[in-house]
Amino acid sequence: MARQTPFNTIKRYRWQEFGLFIIPFMILLLAMTQLLLARSVRAGLIPTSSLSTKNLPTIQGLIPVLGIIIFFFAINFLLSFTFPRADQVLLPLVGLLSGIGVLMALRIGPNLFPPDPTLGTRQLFWVVLGLVTFLVTLFGLRRIEWLKNTYYIWAILGIFMVGITLAHSLRANLNSPTHDQLNIGPLNLQPSELLKIFLVIYFAAYLSKNLDEFAGDDFRIGSIHLPLPPAKILINLLIMLGLALLLFLGIRELGLALLIYGIFLCMIYLGSGKLRYVLSGLVIFFILGFIGYALFGYVRARFDVLGFDVVNWQKWSAADQDFAQNSGLQIVQGLLALSSGGIIGAGIGLGHPTFVPVVQSDMIFTALGEELGLAGLFAILGIYLLLIYRGFRIAMETTDTFSKLLASGLTSIFAIQTIIIIAGNMKILPLTGIPLPFLSYGGSSIIANYIIVGILLRISHNTVMEREGLA
């Protein structure tokens, strides 16, 4: 074994990751500075005509962003000596998104109705807790095969957690949406955030163990071949999918049902490589969607918003105005916020994003659009695309089927969740209550997302170690 020298230590340091952290953190510092200056100008403490370097905020005002920077650089230092071969691009992307999420919580909280001045502090706490969870996942998950061998336990645990939430929602109005929240003391947790990870582990393990089944005939009814997976695989997967969707039918979370079904279709395609299975699943999805539309009033209300004409507001009837001020208020205000942002936005702290209901979670994309503009939204979408690309690249480089399916499935969570919530904010899909990864306020979502990042980095590290013969 080679002797460790200072030169070897410097050489193995995660310099690429370190360099990729610098520019995002400079952006966060500049954005935080602008937010503090905008608050001072709006409060009348600083006249716009006399802005100068003397008006720059103190170090104390920059503490939230400086805290994020310190934590991520500390993790970069730690990983350089423990996981030097893990992917070095994923964490800087996540750090930038998390920083923007904390920044927007700091910006939005004091202007909510009623004000919530501690919103940004709580978001920073959740990010720190998420980073701790990330480290626990990365260090604790030494062998990915352990997840494969215990996949039934994770699936049962996830469904049990959501089952508890279902029991709390039985007294809710059947035509009104409820939230999959589990109250534990002062904490409001969403078991579904962990359920999506558990289901990916289950699907990846089951599919990897039954790949030979996909080589057989499609699902058959007598002599008729249907474009569906073989009966053995289809039945087992549908049991897990059906249980998950049944729970969401009870707690009225349309967005989570879409997310779970999307994960199911992705895993089927990743395991089989047959597009016809996905197309058949989409047909079934539209049939189930029509049934849900016919049975539940809250589903119809979500779809009614899609057909509402916001552009020609001069021609609104009295009924249209009533709809825009009640059922359609969130989407209408969100679209107005997006349009008012223009190309370059109003600037951090200079817009009015809190006119949009629940902007801190469901509609954070519209707040970003108003204050960062179309250019800022394209930049954020680019970050998500890079994040998804790195996740799939980690999956492509793995040497075993389970790790490949697991990394791909976990990355698909980021992709599907981002598409669903952004499309809902832009009135392309029905608006759902799922969070935008790393940007929306919410502790359960942040912790779950950091668990995913931890698993991806562990897979990346193990893959390189195996290829170098060091595992």
Image: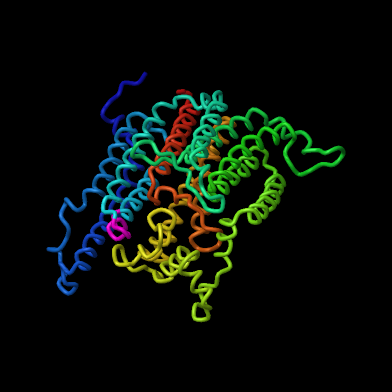
Which is more toward the observer, 392 or 303? 303
The image shows residue 432 at horizontal and vertical percentages of 51, 54
Q: How is the image coloured?
A: rainbow
Name the image quarter holding residue 334.
bottom left
Q: Is residue 416 in view from this perspective?
A: no
Left or right: residue 324 versus residue 35 is right
Taking the spot 43% from the left edge, 67% from the top edge, the residue there is 333
Q: Which corner quadrant holds the N terminus?
A: top left
Residue 189 vs residue 427: left or right?
A: left
Q: Compared to 418, does 308 lie above or below?
A: below
Above/below status of 100 relative to 467: below
**Viewer-nearest residue: 155 or 55:** 155
Q: Relative to 393, is 30 on the left or the right?
A: left
Is-magenta flag for residue 53?
no
Seen as rendered, the residue at the extreme right is 223
Residue 433 at what x, y percent from top left?
A: 48, 52
Q: Is residue 186 visible?
A: yes
Q: Along the line of sight, which residue is nearer the eye, 375 or 240? A: 240
Most extreme residue toward the bottom is 314
Res 303 → quadrant: bottom right
Q: Which residues are magenta?
A: 106-115
Number of marks in the rendered image: 0
Left or right: 63 as drawn, with respect to 416: left
| Residue placed most toward the observer, 323 or 305 | 323
Would you say residue 114 sits in the magenta stretch? yes
Q: Position of residue 121 (x, y in %)?
A: 27, 47
Q: Main secondary structure of the magenta part?
A: helix
Q: Residue furthest top?
A: 1
Q: Is residue 148 above or below residue 332?
A: above
Name the residue: 58% across, 36% down.
405
Q: Position of residue 197 (x, y in %)?
A: 51, 37
